Amino acid sequence: MAKKISTGRSRGHIRQRGNSFQVLVYAGNDPLTGKEIRLTASAKTEAEAKAILKRFRAQVDEQRQAKTNATFRVAMDAWLRTHDVEETTRASYEQYARVHLYPAFGDEPIGKVTARLLEEFYAELRRCSARCDGRPAIEHRTTEPHECRLVKHRRPPGRPPAAGYPAHDCDETGCTVVECRPHQWRPLSAATIRRIHFAVRGVLSAAERWEWITSNPAVLARKPRQPTPQPDPPTVAQAARIIDAAWKQDDSWGTLVWLVIVTGLRRAELLALRWSDVDLAAGVLTVRRNYVRVKRTSIEKDTKTHQMRRLALDPATVEVLTEHRERYDMLCRQVDSEPQEAAFLFSYRPAHDRPCDPSGVTHRYARMCAELGIDSHLHALRHYSATELLTAGVDLRTVAGRLGHGGGGATTLRVYAAWVGDSDRRASEILGGRMKRPRRGAAGDLNEGAATGTGDQ
């Protein structure tokens, strides 16, 4: 029978159960369920139990304990229902939760999600994105496919002995060996872990605002450093081969690849273009929207920076788009329909009433480059456009405007710092070439006319 020990105060008590002491402290009611929240712990001695009781009371007095027993899963589901975010971002958060967060600590009370737990979780993802098939206790020291083995020991009931459990034969005591599926040890990228961290921080910030917890441990947790961008654009010779191969496939595909190179548009911006966005007479292209697929549904949304931008087009590009418009008009006449200004520029349908599939465009470009023996992807053409402009000496702000980068060029400088350095070197050569270096006489003195600029003309 449990024996209650007097502690001199009614808020919290200690009770003895056999050879152990149990500490219980009332910490309020759960705002979600209305049930009482109690801080509990066990100790081997009465003195240790009294120390724990004192610590629990201090936590309650300072309101440092969690105010709900709700799990992290409940908190994240509630955050996703109330958080105002684009559908593409929401879909990413849901995937992070389903694949990484919920298997790790989704069923943990939100008050037990600490900075240490988060840092250990990020370290596991850096070692293996699968977190060793959900068994982080298994330490992997190889990047080769392998079999994971985890022994689940069957122990006698009760508190473990002070000297620890003696060695035994697992087959005789009923212990089991669990094996995980063979898998490749694939670390998760630092950029993805950072995005997961931002999602966790958003959940815990909401929980703090809702007074479910008293502080946000994600603010203190160390996240991976932001990776340094390493753009790898194709060379000028490779770009020429890519353009030539695209035109050989068909004129519409050649126009699409050409437009990406000369404008640096993102894939989603390119596919959202309509003929109403193209002013061939003025030579101007207006970027207003993105076209993306989320959960097998196609949607149009704002640009990444939520701002419209206008791009000037060179005469060659105007000519390319004029021919593309003529082909579209001819297709409409073949199907007995009128050309529409709301039609998309790039489509597999004669009426251009639906744009090309984003994944299909990416895969087609990858196949084309693979046939050419060029290691490239569609987004690399955006890098090519940016680096060529910077190498040609175009100022950073103009390049940032054409790419649709926010921050007044800060993003452009961070991504393309190496090419900005080349442009800066040429700028210094221009200034140095316009100055005359003073000449020294036989005695080493400066020529007064050369130094002051007041010599004979």
Image (tube, helix red, strand yellow):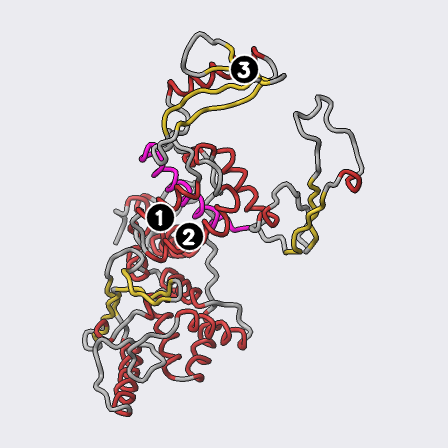
The image quarter in which residue 243 lies: bottom left
**Going by the image, does 94 lie left or right of 139?**
left
Query: Where's the N terminus, which quadrant?
Result: top right
| Cα–Cα span, label 2 and label 3 | 42 Å
- Out of 391 and 137, give the one closest to the viewer: 137
348 up-or-down from 85: above or below:
below
* Picture disc at residue 94: 2
Three-letter code, disc 1: Leu
- The reply to whether the C-beta atoms of the residues labelled 2 and 1 are less than 8 Å apart is yes
- Out of 232 and 219, give the one closest to the viewer: 219
Callout 3 secondary element:
helix
168 up-or-down from 19: above or below:
below
The prevailing secondary structure element of the residues shown in magenta is helix
Indicate yes or no whether the magenta region holds residue 192: yes
Q: Residue furthest left?
A: 281
Mark toward the start of the polypeptide (2 vs 3): 3
46 up-or-down from 289: above or below:
above
Residue 339: x and y, percent?
Answer: 22, 84
Boundaries of the magenta span? 188-211
Residue 321: x and y, percent?
Answer: 29, 79
Density class for disc 1 (Cα within 10 Å; few <14, some 14-19, many ≥20) is: some
Q: Residue furthest top?
A: 8
Q: Residue at x 24, y 67 (%)?
A: 286
Residue that numbered label 1 is attached to: 80
Indicate yes or no whether the magenta region holds residue 336: no
Residue that numbered label 3 is attached to: 49
